[in-house]
Amino acid sequence: MDNSQNQSPSTENLPENAAKATFAAGCFWHVEYAFSQIPGVISTTVGYTDGKTKRPTYKQVCSNTTGHAEAVEVIYDPEKVTYEQLLDVFWGCHDPTQLNRQGPDVGEQYRSSILYHNEAQKIAAEQSKQKLDTSGKYDKPIVTSITPAVTFYEAEEYHQDYFKKNGIKCSGG
């Protein structure tokens, strides 16, 4: 599939009263499913972000040469779900102490990262990370990066809503 036109919409094209959040936490199928189950989440899109190649394909990202992370872009209604609640889902759906891997998936495309869209998200993410890091929940430090959101490229259609399309049940998230 040619995904050359699949850059995500800008914040200006969001539905009225909606906000955008972007998270990378390993394989995007599981992460998308976790966020899609949250009341107040309007939509989820899996894709690639934070890399150097324009319009990468899944094959290119998996080659570990593009610098992209598999990520999920979440469009949500802040009157129904807060960014802090989304952060709780993010922390709960992966191990943020694993560098460039989640479980059996290894490579920088599986890194843990919060990509903020505004200063309020940045502050909330930093506070949330610090709170979790000092909570004693983990024996190792959290390696999750917190960086400004950059261009998000939508993944190929067969990756979107993968669990739903394939009848796979996911207990995580």
Image (cartoon, rainbow, N blue to C red):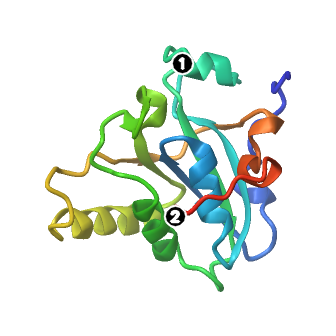
Distance CA(mark 1)–CA(mark 2): 28 Å
**How many numbered circles does the render carry?**
2
User: Label 1 neighbourhood size at 10 Å, few (<14), some (14-19), many (20+)?
Assistant: many
Q: Which residue is mark 1?
A: 66
Pointers 1 and 2 in contact (CB under 8 A)?
no
Q: Which residue is mark 2?
A: 173
User: In terms of depth relative to the viewer, which is nearer, 140 or 74?
Assistant: 140
Q: As shown in the figure, which amino acid type bears the numbered disc 1? A: Thr
Q: Secondary structure at mark 2?
A: loop
Visible in this render: residue 20? no
Q: At which x and y percent is residue 9?
A: 77, 48
Q: At which x and y percent is residue 62?
A: 56, 21
121 vs 38: above or below: above
User: Label 2 neighbourhood size at 10 Å, few (<14), some (14-19), many (20+)?
Assistant: some
Please tell me in which quadrant of the rendered image residue 46 appears: top right
Q: In the rendered structure, find residue 170 and report the number of the disc placed on it.
A: none
Q: As shown in the figure, which amino acid type bears the numbered disc 2? A: Gly
Q: Secondary structure at mark 1?
A: loop
Residue projecting furthest to the bottom = 79
State the residue at coordinates (68%, 78%). 40
Q: Earlier in the sequence, mark 1 or mark 2?
A: 1
User: In terms of depth relative to the viewer, which is nearer, 97 or 105?
Assistant: 105
State the residue at coordinates (21%, 66%). 137
Visible in this render: residue 171? yes
Q: At which x and y percent is residue 138?
A: 19, 59
143 vs 2: above or below: below
State the residue at coordinates (46%, 35%). 110
Q: Determine whether, in the image, residue 56 is placed left or right of residue 121.
A: right
Q: Determine whether, in the image, residue 155 is placed left or right of residue 73.
A: right
Q: Determine whether, in the image, residue 155 is placed left or right of residue 51.
A: right
Nearest to the eye among marks 1 and 2: give it.
Answer: 2
Q: At which x and y percent is residue 155?
A: 72, 35
